[in-house]
Image: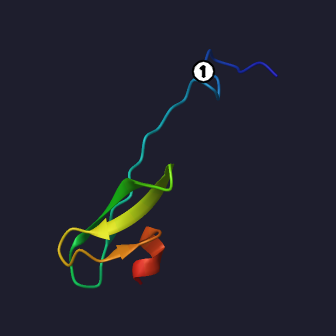
Amino acid sequence: MAQAGGGKSKNSRTTVTTQKFFCPCGGEIEMKEIAQGGKKKPIAECNKCKRIERRPSDFI
């Protein structure tokens, strides 16, 4: 299906959004990767209280 008016194709449109997560203590949650058993394992860590969880939504 051709677009009228010479608009951009859906594949050429790029948007970059970042999401910030915050711990109940008030610190910002940062994603990190650690090597464990020869594999990379992503973890979420609070900058303020140094609490570590598997993903940012586990802090709630």
Is 44 drawn above or below residue 37 in the view shown? below
Residue furthest out toward the right: 1
Is 18 or 40 nearer to us in this picture? 40
Residue lying furthest top: 6
Q: Secondary structure at mark 1?
A: loop
Residue 12 spot, x, y in % from top left: 57, 23
User: Residue 22's x, y, as percent?
Assistant: 30, 73
Relative to 22, residue 43 above or below: above
Point 29% across, 84% down: residue: 24
Q: Characterize the local packing of mark 1: few (<14), some (14-19) or many (20 or more) Cα atoms within 10 angstroms.
A: few
Is residue 38 placed above or below 20 in the rendered structure?
above
Query: Percent x, y for residue 30?
Result: 31, 61
Q: Which residue is mark 1?
A: 7
The quadrant of the image that shows the C terminus is: bottom left
Residue at 71%, 21% (x, y): give it: 3
Is 59 placed left or right of 12 in the picture? left
Q: Toward the viewer: 14 or 58? A: 58
